[in-house]
Image (cartoon, rainbow, N blue to C red):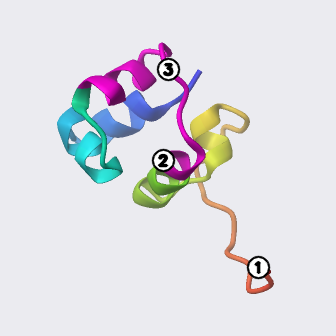
Amino acid sequence: MLRIRELREDKDKKQIEIAELLGIQQNSYSQIENGINTIQVDHLIRLASFYNTSTDYILGLTDEMKPYPKSNNMT
């Protein structure tokens, strides 16, 4: 289960605001939040950056909200 609703609500954001950040329609974002559609990788990365957390946290793979340290060795 994605944690994007919880993160959005903690930031007092509306679905339309996050949809605009991702460049998608509000109803498309709503379907992602409700598990009807899957999230695209680029949207997942953008949300992790916006919420200052890891993609693993958003995906429910860890309970650690703190993002991973950035690597200088990205090739």
Queried whether the magenta region covers residue 24, the answer comes back as no
Label located before the other in sequence (3 or 1): 3
The answer to which image quadrant residue 58 occupies is: top right
Q: Position of residue 74 (x, y in %)?
A: 76, 79
The residue drawn where x is 79% and y is 80% is 75
Instruction: Give the class, few, some or many, for how many residues have Cα within 10 Å of label 3's Cα (few <14, many ≥20).
Output: few
Q: Determine whether 21 is above or below 75 in the image.
A: above
Q: Amino acid at mark 3?
A: Asn
Question: Residue 51 got which mark?
Answer: none
Left or right, 1 with reference to 36: right
Q: Amino acid at mark 2?
A: His
The answer to which image quadrant residue 38 occupies is: top right
The residue drawn where x is 34% and y is 30% is 29
Q: Main secondary structure of the magenta part?
A: helix
Instruction: Give the class, few, some or many, for how many residues have Cα within 10 Å of label 2's Cα (few <14, many ≥20).
Output: some
User: At numbered mark 3, what does the secondary structure look like: helix, strand or loop?
Assistant: loop
Q: Which residue is mark 1?
A: 74
User: At numbered mark 2, what does the secondary structure look like: helix, strand or loop?
Assistant: helix
Which range of residues does the magenta coloring cover?
27-44
Residue in the foreground of this view, choosing between 13 and 75: 75
Circles 3 and 1, Cβ within 8 Å, touching? The answer is no
Q: Which residue is mark 3?
A: 37
Queried whether the magenta region covers residue 43, the answer comes back as yes
User: At numbered mark 1, what does the secondary structure look like: helix, strand or loop?
Assistant: loop
Q: Which residue is mark 2?
A: 43
Q: Position of residue 20 (x, y in %)?
A: 23, 47
Q: Estimate the spatial distance between the alpha carbons at disc 2 and disc 3, rounded to whole Å.
A: 13 Å
Q: Estimate the spatial distance between the alpha carbons at disc 3 and disc 1, rounded to whole Å.
A: 30 Å
Label located before the other in sequence (2 or 1): 2
Label located before the other in sequence (2 or 3): 3
Q: Position of residue 62 (x, y in %)?
A: 71, 38
Q: Estimate the spatial distance between the alpha carbons at disc 2 and disc 1, rounded to whole Å.
A: 20 Å
